[in-house]
Amino acid sequence: MDSSAPYIVGPWLIGKDRGVLDRLVESRLLWDRRIAIMATFAFIKAGDFD
């Protein structure tokens, strides 16, 4: 799942509320936190550094 985050989750969040990433980062589950990190690669690729 985390390997698809930059290709599915990240692009889906571009231009949308990114609150879901905050919830994932605060999760106790390692894989939830990793998905949040991996999803940000889509923002970096799009030149969105906010």
Image: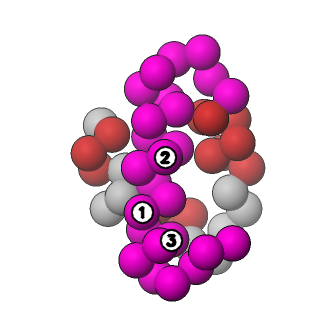
Q: Amino acid at mark 3?
A: Phe
Residue 16: say if magenta.
no
Question: Looking at the image, do the residues carrying marks 1 and 3 touch, with CB atoms under 8 Å apart?
Answer: yes
Q: Position of residue 19 (x, y in %)?
A: 73, 50
Q: Amino acid at mark 1?
A: Phe
**Rendered residue at 68%/57% (across/down):** 18
Q: What color scheme is it?
A: secondary structure
- Determine the CA span between mark 3 and mark 2: 11 Å
Which range of residues does the magenta coloring cover?
A: 26-50
Which residue is identified by label 1?
41
**Rendered residue at 46%/82% (across/down):** 46
**Disc 3 on helix, strand or loop?**
helix
Relative to 18, does residue 28 appear above or below in the rendering?
above
Q: Which of the numbered marks, if any, corresponds to residue 43?
A: 3
Left or right of residue 3, residue 5 in this image: right
**Rendered residue at 72%/62% (across/down):** 17
Q: Quadrant of residue 49?
A: bottom right
Which residue is identified by label 2?
37
Q: Position of residue 8 (x, y in %)?
A: 36, 58
Relative to 13, does residue 36 appear above or below in the rendering?
above
In this view, the residue in front, 25 or 18, is 25
Left or right of residue 48, residue 17 in this image: right
**Disc 1 on helix, strand or loop?**
helix
Q: Position of residue 23 (x, y in %)?
A: 69, 35
